[in-house]
Image: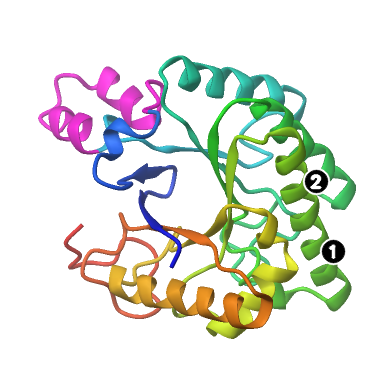
Amino acid sequence: MPKATVLAACIIFISVEAAANATDSFYVNPGSPAAQWVKQNSESPLSTKIQTSIASVPSAQWLTGTSQATDKLTDIISQYVGAADKAHKPPILVAYNLPGRDCSGGASAGGAANAVEYRDWIDRFINGIGDKPALVILEPDALADSECLTLPKRDERLELFNYAVSGFKQRAPLAEVYLDAGNSGWKPTATMAGYLNAAGVRNARGFALNVSNFYNLDQFRSYGDAINAKLSADYGYAKAMVIDTSRYGNGATPGDWCNPPGLNT
């Protein structure tokens, strides 16, 4: 069975606990929001705790289409992955800009205006990574959420996934790309395996789980293993998976997704 890597996440960034020594494995952004907070609030009694538990932990840089100007995207990513390369630590990046983003929930609505705009945006993203190593989480929620789209728009979304995966493979060969596969309480494993295959996961490193949810780790290991079992049985291959764990704690009431009480994280 392919290896499962464990990630940990926050709304703004993904903190990482991969393998045994995450802090030795991935890039720590010295300009992260947490690091900036510590710098600006050095006298706060919380500063030491935030420095240790958040600012010093590897985190993912989210690229959304609105958080960075598109015409500067390639340079921004190039500088970021370049700094990580100099530190000999691969960075984690999240691409989150598909048209019709979060079409069922709406809390994170937005994304590129159309397919042409998205292709231009993801091309700039890929070109920014170039020949440097990186771990990329591709479009959180987009596959699990695709049923809120019309059939033509659903097909377009799958085509854009394939376009992105192909572009990373050709022009950013050291990037390890993981297609987001939602959470264990969202889609049946057979459905998600079908979506992943149609989206081009065969040509990616694998799939990602639990970017913004609170199911527990055992549930996600089982769900990911079941997805791989379906991929293997139906399509003849299985893939690596990454699991975001920072929100899960002891799990939460089903349906809670925004800092529910009683978690032991």
Left or right of 148? Residue 8 is left
Question: What residue is shown with label 1?
Answer: 156
For label 1, the crowd category at 10 Å Cα-Cα, with few meaning under 14, some 14 to 19 and many 20 or more, is some
Q: How is the image coloured?
A: rainbow
Instruction: Give the residue type at disc 1.
Output: Glu
Question: Residue 18: where, in percent of width, then height?
Answer: 33, 46
Question: Residue 133: where, in percent of width, then height?
Answer: 55, 31
Q: Give above or below for 31 relative to 8.
A: above
Question: Residue 153: where, in percent of width, then height?
Answer: 84, 68
Identify the image quadrant of the C terminus: bottom left
Q: Residue at x 78, y 63 (%)?
A: 157
Which disc, if any, is residue 165?
Answer: none
Q: Residue at x 78, y 64 (%)?
A: 158
For this rendering, which residue is in front, 76 or 195?
195
Over which residues does the magenta segment extend? Answer: 28-53
From mark 1 to mark 2, how far is it between C-alphas?
11 Å
Question: What residue is shown with label 2?
Answer: 118
Left or right of 197? Residue 50 is left
Q: Residue at x 60, y 82 (%)?
A: 233
Q: Mark 1 near mark 2, Cβ–Cβ under 8 Å?
A: no
Instruction: Give the residue type at disc 2.
Output: Tyr
Q: Give above or below for 77 relative to 107.
A: above
- Is 32 magenta? The answer is yes
For this rendering, which residue is in front, 26 or 245?
26
- Is 214 magenta? The answer is no
Q: Give above or below for 247 relative to 117.
A: below
Question: SS of the residue at dot 1?
Answer: helix
Quarter occupied by residue 221: bottom left
